[in-house]
Structure formats: structure tokens, C-alpha cells
Image (cartoon, rainbow, N blue to C red):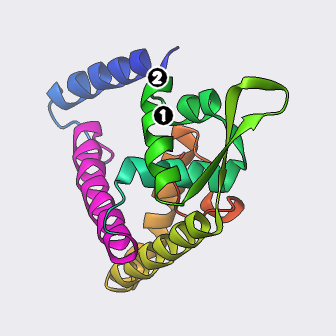
């Protein structure tokens, strides 16, 4: 079953469950979805603030490209485009801007001169590390302000959400809190 059809089925099940008198509302899909959407807005805001503190001219999509290169190593332009889920022409424009800013190197692929290999520079690595560190600090402050009794359940819920979405744990990723 595709993720889209699974969501449709889950949404249908949620509507029919909530239409029943006395239906249980714990785990209500609409309520959870709204909470996740709100949390995602918060996390995007944290990401934007941390990035602006480190490099104010870099966009979130450009930063995402740096994170992919930081976690995957040098990539062909077409592979970067695939990881970012963008057209190769979009990835090319992004790579040109990042190369002009000194954050990535572009070199011809020794196996196929028509292709470019993109790699993070030291400057690009520092931007990724600093922005990730700032995000970690801000998220830690938010978590510290949560009631302690909610933290374990929050972690369990997020871990289940990540597994359902196919996202590996950040602790196993060379770029914690990064996008891919």
C-alpha cells in the first residue's frame, strides 16, 4: 500500500471512528496531524533562526543540499537532485550558488567528463556544523522547558513517528538534526 493510500485509509478510519458515539479520541489522527504540523512549523523556524545566525544569505533548501553532501559525501549532480527531490536544473542552479559562495567544490567526474561531482568545502562543513549545533541548543532549550513527565512519552511518540516515516535516528546520522 502506498503512503498516500495508507493516509487515505487512515483518514477514512479516523472519520468513521470519530463518528461513532463514545469513540475513543486518544490518538485521533486529525489531532495528531495538527500537533505534528504545528511542531514542524516550530522546527522550521528553529532551523531558519539557526541558519540566519550562522550564514544569513543561505536559504533552507541550499542548507539542505549542504547537509546531504555532508552526510553522503561527494555526489554527482543528478544524485544530489534525487536526494533533494528537485529537477537536475534546480540542483545545478543551487550548486552554482553554493560554489560561488565557497561552500562546495564542483569538479568533472573522472569517469564521465559530462557530469559534475559536488563536494563540501571546509567552509560548507563549518556552516553545517555551526547551524546544526545552534539548532541542537535551541531544541534542547525547548525540551528543557517541557514538563519532565512528558519527555519520555514525547520521545516514544517521536521515535514511532520517525519509524513510520522511514527516517533513521539522528544519533546514527553523521549530521544530527539534518535533512535528507
**Magenta segment boundaries in residue numbering:** 27-55
- For disc 2, the marked residue is 3
Indicate the quadrant containing the C terminus: top left, top right, bottom left or bottom right. top right
Q: Is residue 32 magenta?
A: yes
**Residue in the image at 43% along x and 48% along y:** 97
Please say if 70 is above or below 6: below
Give the mark count: 2
**Residue in the image at 29% along x and 46% along y:** 32
Residue at the extreme right of the image, as rendered: 111
- For disc 1, the marked residue is 91
Question: Is residue 52 visible to us here?
Answer: yes
Q: Magenta part mainly helix, strand or loop?
A: helix
Label 1, secondary structure: give it. helix
Query: Mark number for residue 36?
Result: none
Labels 2, 1: front one:
1
**Residue in the image at 51% along x and 47% along y:** 65
Q: Is residue 44 magenta?
A: yes
The quarter holding residue 23 reads: top left
Please say if 19 is above or below 60: above
Is 50 or 151 nearer to us in this picture? 50
**Residue in the image at 56% along x and 63% along y:** 124
Indicate the position of residue 73 as horizontal and vertical percent values: 72, 50
Indicate the position of residue 4 as horizontal and vertical percent values: 40, 19
Label 2, secondary structure: give it. helix
Amino acid at each position: 500500500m502506498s503512503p498516500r493510500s495508507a493516509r487515505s485509509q487512515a483518514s477514512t478510519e479516523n472519520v468513521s471512528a470519530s463518528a461513532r458515539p463514545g469513540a475513543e479520541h486518544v490518538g485521533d489522527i486529525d489531532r495528531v496531524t495538527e500537533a505534528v504540523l504545528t511542531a514542524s512549523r516550530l522546527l522550521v523556524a528553529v532551523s531558519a533562526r539557526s541558519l540566519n545566525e550562522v550564514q544569513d544569505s543561505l536559504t533552507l533548501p541550499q542548507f539542505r543540499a549542504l547537509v546531504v553532501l555532508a552526510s553522503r559525501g561527494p555526489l554527482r549532480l543528478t544524485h544530489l537532485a534525487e536526494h533533494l527531490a528537485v529537477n537536475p536544473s534546480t540542483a545545478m542552479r543551487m550548486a552554482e550558488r553554493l560554489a560561488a559562495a565557497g561552500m562546495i567544490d564542483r569538479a568533472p567526474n573522472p569517469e564521465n567528463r559530462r557530469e559534475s561531482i559536488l563536494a563540501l568545502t571546509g567552509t560548507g562543513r563549518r556552516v553545517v556544523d555551526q547551524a546544526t549545533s545552534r539548532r541542537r541548543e535551541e531544541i534542547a532549550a525547548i525540551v528543557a522547558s517541557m514538563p519532565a513527565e512528558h519527555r519520555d512519552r514525547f520521545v516514544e511518540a517521536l521515535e514511532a513517528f520517525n519509524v513510520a516515516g522511514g527516517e533513521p535516528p539522528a544519533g546514527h546520522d553523521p549530521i544530527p538534526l539534518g535533512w535528507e
